[in-house]
Image (spheres, grey):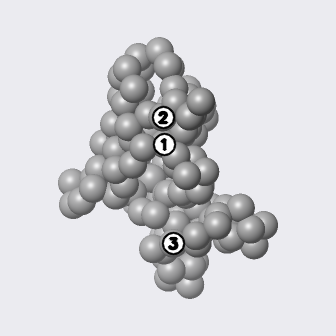
């Protein structure tokens, strides 16, 4: 008997990041990290910045960084509308580290900034941390040999 799958789609204002049949997805929601399996109850939630892990129907793991957005789980389908989302293999670790360093510097000097500017800096820092975490997870999967075609 074949494993049950879920139709998964993650889109940003710019593009469709991934559209695939999957076995499960783990996502960072406002209530904490959740794993969605086939026959999950319907759900709508806010996404927090973090890492999305998807196990494809061919058992290959996909790792993505997301900066926030919404998730809707329906019967046999998951739709994620993300502010930004990037597949880990698309990310450049050196550029991420530089952007993170700049965001941390801005945060240190933000004491004299208004609340809106400070919030913007904090959001940028969270996004870069999520991207770095996604790259690190993806690299670990590759080194452990868990992704056969990566």
Residue lying furthest bottom: 94
Residue lying furthest left: 13
Could you give the CA–CA distance between mark 1 and mark 3, rounded to whole angstroms? 18 Å
Q: Earlier in the sequence, mark 1 or mark 3?
A: 1
Q: State the residue position of label 2.
A: 5
Q: State the residue position of label 3.
A: 89
Rendered view: 108 above or below 58? below
Which marked residue is nearer to the observer: mark 1 or mark 3? Answer: 1
Residue lying furthest front: 1
SS at badge 1: strand
Residue 16 percent across, percent down from the top left: 27, 56
Task: Name the image quarter holding the N terminus.
Answer: top right
Which marked residue is nearer to the observer: mark 3 or mark 2? Answer: 2
Tell whether label 2 touches label 3 (CB within 8 Å).
no
Residue 112 percent across, percent down from the top left: 44, 61
Is 147 positioned to the left or the right of 56 in the image? Answer: right
Callout 2 crowding tier (Cα within 10 Å): few <14, some 14–19, many ≥20: some
Tell me the number on the disc at residue 117: none
Q: Residue at x 49, y 57 (%)?
A: 65
Q: Residue at x 71, y 61 (%)?
A: 146
Q: Earlier in the sequence, mark 3 or mark 2?
A: 2
Nearest the eye: 125 or 132? 132
Total marks placed: 3
Task: Name the image quarter holding the C terminus.
Answer: bottom right
Tell whether label 2 touches label 1 (CB within 8 Å).
yes
Q: Residue at x 56, y 84 (%)?
A: 94
Nearest the eye: 131 or 34? 34
Callout 3 crowding tier (Cα within 10 Å): few <14, some 14–19, many ≥20: some
Q: Earlier in the sequence, mark 1 or mark 2?
A: 2
Residue 92 percent across, percent down from the top left: 51, 80
SS at badge 2: loop
């Amino acid at each position: 008997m074949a494993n049950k799958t879920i139709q998964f789609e993650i889109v940003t204002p710019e593009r469709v990041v991934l559209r695939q049949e999957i076995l499960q997805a783990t996502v960072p929601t406002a209530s904490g990290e959740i794993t969605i399996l086939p026959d999950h109850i319907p759900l709508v939630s806010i996404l927090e910045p973090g890492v999305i892990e998807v196990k494809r129907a061919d058992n290959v793991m996909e790792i993505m960084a997301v900066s926030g957005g919404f998730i809707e789980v329906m019967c046999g389908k998951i739709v994620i509308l993300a502010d930004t989302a990037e597949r880990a293999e698309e990310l450049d670790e050196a550029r991420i580290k530089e952007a993170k360093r700049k965001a941390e510097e801005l945060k240190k000097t933000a004491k004299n900034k208004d609340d809106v500017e400070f919030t913007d800096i904090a959001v940028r820092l969270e996004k870069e941390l999520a991207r770095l975490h996604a790259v690190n997870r993806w690299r670990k999967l590759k080194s452990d040999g868990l992704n056969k075609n990566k």
